[in-house]
Amino acid sequence: MKNNAIKLSLIMIAIIILVFWLTGLLGLWTNGISYIANNTKEYTDAKGHILKGKYSISIDLSNLKSNIGKELYNDGTHRIYVSWIDNTGSVNSGGYRIGFRSSGHYSLTGASLISGVHHETVDENSFTYSMSAKMKAEYHSKVYNCSLFGTSGLNYKDGDDFAFYIFPSESYEMKEVSLHETGIVKLTVTDLYKNIWSKK
């Protein structure tokens, strides 16, 4: 009797796993957005587009850790927030840097992610990503173009991350900024990309 109960339980578990696998729920549960993005037979990314608008955030250079979690974008479904910020302590390694984390939405009907990164299907088996966003820093009434520090693929179940250098190297060389700033810098990001994966 006990053996029959164990066998029945194992059969039920196997059936549940099979159903999860066949419906795609297992892949969605383990891989999130990347499961949808990599499933080119069932989903397409043709509807993605650049978002219009400027999105700004104020960063306190006197207390870098206090900026972590500040939101650059939040529409109730998609969110971009400061995940890290640091000062390398050297102009040669970039000085002040900031990283943003993007999170979106996914289900079996599709997925969407608003990010600084455009994720794109090249063909059925290959994918690429590139930075679409641009960032400017306004500090002491001067505006600087910020250069890209890094981007990622869909490394998280619900999104990715991207990062910028806050000030260009010339601003340090010309003594417009130092490695010991204590003011507030306004960062403005444009050309965020709305990645959309929908059922074919």
Image (cartoon, rainbow, N blue to C red):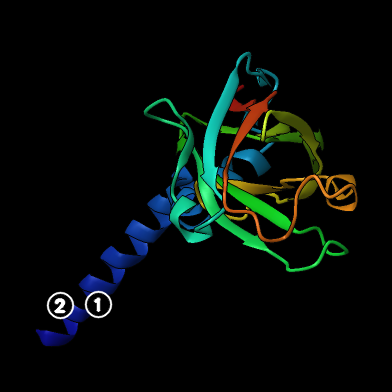
Closest to the observer: 183 or 1?
183
Residue 153 at x, y percent in the picture: 70, 49
At a point 66% along the width and 60% down the height, the residue shown is 180
Q: Which mark is residue 5?
A: 2
On the picture, is 193 further left or further right than 9?
A: right
Residue 139 at x, y percent in the picture: 67, 36
On the picture, is 20 further left or further right than 179?
A: left
At a point 71% along the width and 51% down the height, the residue shown is 152
Asked if the residue under mark 2 is in contact with the one under mark 1, i.e. CB atoms within 8 Å, the reply is yes
- Name the secondary structure under disc 1: helix
- Name the secondary structure under disc 2: helix
At a point 54% along the width and 44% down the height, the residue shown is 59
Residue 192 at x, y percent in the picture: 65, 27
Closest to the observer: 5 or 187?
187
The residue where tag 1 is placed is: 7
Residue type for callout 2: Ala
Q: Is residue 44 at least partly visible in the picture?
A: no
